[in-house]
Every structure is written in structure tokens, then in C-alpha cells.
Amino acid sequence: MDSIKSITLYHLMIKGEKFIGIKFAPDRLIQSLVKGLPNPKWSHRYNMAYIPHNKANLGIIFNTFKGVVYINYNRFLTNRAIKRSNTVVDVAWLRNRKPIPGHRFCPEEYLLKLELKRYARSTVKTYVHCFEMFLNHYKTKEPNSLNESDVRAFLQTLINKNASNSYLNQTINAIKFYYEVVLGMPNRLYAIERPRKERKLPTVISKEEVLSMIAHTNNIKHRCIVQLLYSSGLRRSELLNLKPQDIDGQRMLIHIKNAKGNKDRLTLLSKTALTDLRKYYVMHRPKTYLFEGRKGTKYSGESVLSIVRAAARKAHIRTRVTPHVLRHSFATHLLESGADLRQIQVLLGHGSSKTTEIYTHVATNTFKCIKNPLD
């Protein structure tokens, strides 16, 4: 069976002019169709054909290849929104920062695009921080005049400072966002090399250690927080966004809304945790969020981290325990008790099964069935 013929469209900026890039695998039919397009040329640098960028030519491409060759617009339609919810993204705090002598802030159009794309607050902070580092590395140059060599030189300074691979990738994403999304000229960074992804095993603690942590919490509120992080596999942000009505005591489920990737899901509710949650609710009567600060505002992420660390310290656990370690432990313990990987993937809200498969590398039942050659 023949494979499906396809082309991928790209934005190209060559000598200050915009073009539509057309990338495809060697194929006589596609080559002949491309030759019939208005004024086609070939770029050896980007290894693709290109024609002038205008609305008419985009229509010609569609009519030329329609029904014959699949057209991939994913790289071309860079300005589509990434979230469809009504999430409000607050970047006013970035706009209202006091000027710092000698420091260049993010341009307004960059902040505006982050608003329109509805990125999470943590992503906004990371992108702005990384892009402002890049801007201030080249204080005397306009960002539009910088090229791939300048980006590589900047990344090299981060490498010399022992920046992690994930930090380098975040920085590349922040810079690419400016050229690809804000300026609409993504080919500026096509050839930038990304560092290889680090594959680290998740940190996991034993069930006994988790129970010891719960026993060493200061009060009912702290105990419920540790219990939910572990027994439901929650991310810290998911815990903080929980509302009382998200706890379904009849079906023994927790409804998580607008989680990572703007996805809703259901996860498990522990009977033990539900008993303590009912005691907590009677004592504290939270109004909006399940866990609130003294003034009725959403509980802070720093407070949750402090609670987890304090409980681990009192339980004399040597491993550095964070809320995410409890989530890793939840998944690993489920796998060890015979739960299916697909079920765990759904409970954790992973988009890909490959993400969930990492827990097979730390589950003890993976190794128990193997006889040690020394024995």
C-alpha cells in the first residue's frame, strides 16, 4: 500500500520578504504540481520550495493539491489559539513593573501574544524571564536584527553556566515564540540545535514513608493536603484549584478541571482522605477553594511545598520530597499493585502513554521476578 503523499507549509522570510515554504519528500507528482505554482523557487538553505506569500497564492496551493496531496498547515498556522477555555491570563503585573536602569523589558507585542494564546501564568513567567535575558545579552542590538548565530552564541553562555537541558529548551522556546508567533517569521530559528532531552527516573518513596509523613502533619488541613497529593496523584496546581464541589463522595472521585493542557479528568478519592476532608470542612468552611489562606484567598504553592517538606523532615525521610514526588509515588504504587498502565495514564492526565511508561523503570515488581545471577 502506497504511503499518503503530503506537503508541509512554512513561513519563510528571505531578504526581508515573506514567502510560503513548501516542504515535501522527493516525489515526481508533487514536484510537477509545485512547478505549476506562481514563480516557484528552491531554497537550498531550508531544503524546500517557496513562492511569494499572499492570500491568492495560499488559495492556489489549496486548489492545486486538494484531493491529490495532503496539506499539513500545522507549522504555517502559528497564530491559532492554544486554549479554547475562558481562562483569564493576567500579564498586567509584567506591564506595571517599575523601570530598571539599563534593563530592557519584553516588548508589548510579546505580552499581548501571551495573553491571546492564554498561556499558563508559570509559562508566561518563564518565557518573559528567558526572553528578557536574551534581549539584555544584546542590549545594543534590535531583536529583529539578530540571527541564528547570535542565538547560538547566547545559548553557549548559558551552557558555560551549566544550565540544564530543560532550561536551554525553555529559553529556545521563549526566543522562538518571538520570531515565530509575534513576528510571523519562524525560519529565523529552523536550524537551531536543541539539546537532547534528559531521561531521569522519577523519585519515589515507599508506602510506609508516605504514611509516616501523613502521621507527622501538624493539623487536619495539612494532613488532607498530603493525603490528596498522594492518594489522588494530584499536581500541586491541581490541588490548589480544587473547589469543595469537585469532591464527589458518592462516586469516590475527584473532578479536576482545566488541568495541564487545559484538560478535565477524574481521579481516585481515598476513603481515608474523604473522612478527614469532612472533618476539615466542618472546621474551616472554605468558601471558594477547598484550601484557602487566612483571608479566603487561594492557598499558595509555596505553603503546600513547605507542608510536604516539613512532614518529610519530621518522618526522618532522607529523600528530598516534593508534591510531585508524592504524585510519582502514587503512580508507582498503583503499578506495583497490578493497575494497568492505561488506567494510570488516565488518572494522571498524561497525554501520551510514553510519559506513563517511565514508572515501569522504578516499580519494584519489575525486578522481583528477575533472579539475581549471584543468588
Image (cartoon, helix red, strand yellow):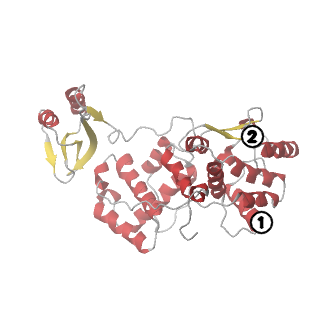
The location of residue 262, given as percent across then percent down, is: 55, 40
Which one is nearer the viewer's eye here, 334 or 297? 334
Q: Is residue 138 visible?
A: no
The location of residue 76, given as percent across then percent down, is: 32, 40
Query: What residue sits right under mark 1 in the picture?
Result: 315
Amino acid identity at mark 2: Thr
Disc 2 residue crowd, few under 14, some 14–19, many 20+, Cα 10 Å: some
- Dot 2 falls on a residue whose secondary structure is loop
Query: What residue sits right under mark 2 in the picture?
Result: 288
- Dot 1 falls on a residue whose secondary structure is loop
Q: Is residue 63 visible?
A: yes
Vertical relation: 267 (above or below) 226: above
Q: Is residue 83 left or right of residue 143?
A: right
Q: Quadrant of the C terminus?
A: bottom right
Counting the numbered discs, the total is 2
Q: Residue furthest bottom?
A: 160
Q: Quadrant of residue 312?
A: bottom right
Vertical relation: 27 (above or below) 327: above
Mark 2–mark 1 CB contact (< 8 Å): no
Closer to the chain start, of discs 2 and 1, is 2
The location of residue 109, given as percent across then percent down, is: 43, 48
Which one is nearer the viewer's eye here, 1 or 368? 368
Q: Is residue 363 left or right of residue 135?
A: right
